[in-house]
């Protein structure tokens, strides 16, 4: 591990900044991995912001005709959650876990 961890991007704060700090303190990352980490932290920040909006105003809104629709923040939260998970997975820093998927019905494990 290097003696000096890369500085957290200035636009990150709160939980995304903590994720950055914990990750760079634990792992020595190359430039392309730092770019993935930053993008993952950005997605995390968007997810948190969208989630707070959903909690504040609710997941359903009425369109101009009075028809219930999903609030746009619901989509932003979902998309950001998926992006964060994919970007962080791309870093390859996860601890390997055994395949925990259930067996197919009527089939064998092998």
Image (cartoon, grey):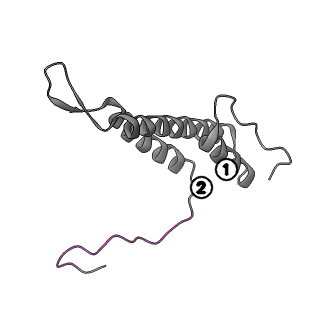
53 with respect to 89 (left or right): left
Label 1 belongs to which residue? 23
Near mark 1 (Cα within 10 A), the count class, few <14, some 14-19 or many ≥20, is: some
Compared to residue 108, the image places residue 15 above or below, namely above
Is residue 105 part of the magenta span, yes or no? yes
Marking on residue 82: none
75 and 49: which is toward the camera:
49
Residue lying furthest top: 64
Task: Tell me where residue 96 appears, x and y as whole percent.
Answer: 53, 66
Is most of the magenta stretch helix, strand or loop?
A: loop
86 and 52: which is toward the camera:
52
Task: Identify the residue shown where x is 41% and y is 70%.
Answer: 99
Q: How many labels does the image show?
A: 2
What secondary structure is found at the residue carrying circle 1?
helix
Task: Tell me where residue 102 appears, x and y as whole percent.
Answer: 30, 73
Compared to residue 94, the image places residue 103 above or below, namely below
Viewer-side label of 2, 1: 1
Q: How far apart are marks 2 and 1 (CA)?
A: 9 Å
Task: Identify the residue shown where x is 46% and y is 39%.
Answer: 47
Task: Tell me where residue 69 appears, x and y as whole percent.
Answer: 21, 32
**Magenta segment:** 95-107
Residue lying furthest front: 56
7 and 68: which is toward the camera:
68
Marking on residue 93: 2
Compared to residue 93, the image places residue 11 above or below, namely above
Task: Identify the residue shown where x is 51% and y is 50%.
Answer: 89
Q: In which quarter of the image is residue 41?
A: top right
Compared to residue 98, the image places residue 21 above or below, namely above
Question: Are the residues flagged by discs 2 and 1 in contact, CB closer than 8 Å?
Answer: yes
Is residue 48 part of the magenta span, yes or no? no
Near mark 2 (Cα within 10 A), the count class, few <14, some 14-19 or many ≥20, is: few
């Amino acid at each position: 591990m290097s003696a000096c961890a890369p500085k957290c991007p200035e636009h990150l704060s709160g939980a995304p900044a903590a994720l950055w700090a914990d990750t760079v303190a634990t792992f020595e990352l190359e430039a392309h991995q730092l770019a993935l980490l930053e993008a993952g932290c950005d997605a995390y920040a968007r997810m948190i912001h969208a989630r707070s909006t959903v909690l504040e105003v609710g997941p359903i809104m009425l369109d101009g005709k009075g028809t219930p629709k999903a609030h746009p923040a619901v989509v932003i939260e979902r998309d950001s959650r998926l992006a964060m998970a994919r970007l962080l997975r791309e870093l390859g820093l996860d601890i390997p876990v055994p395949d925990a998927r259930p067996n197919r019905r009527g089939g064998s494990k092998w």
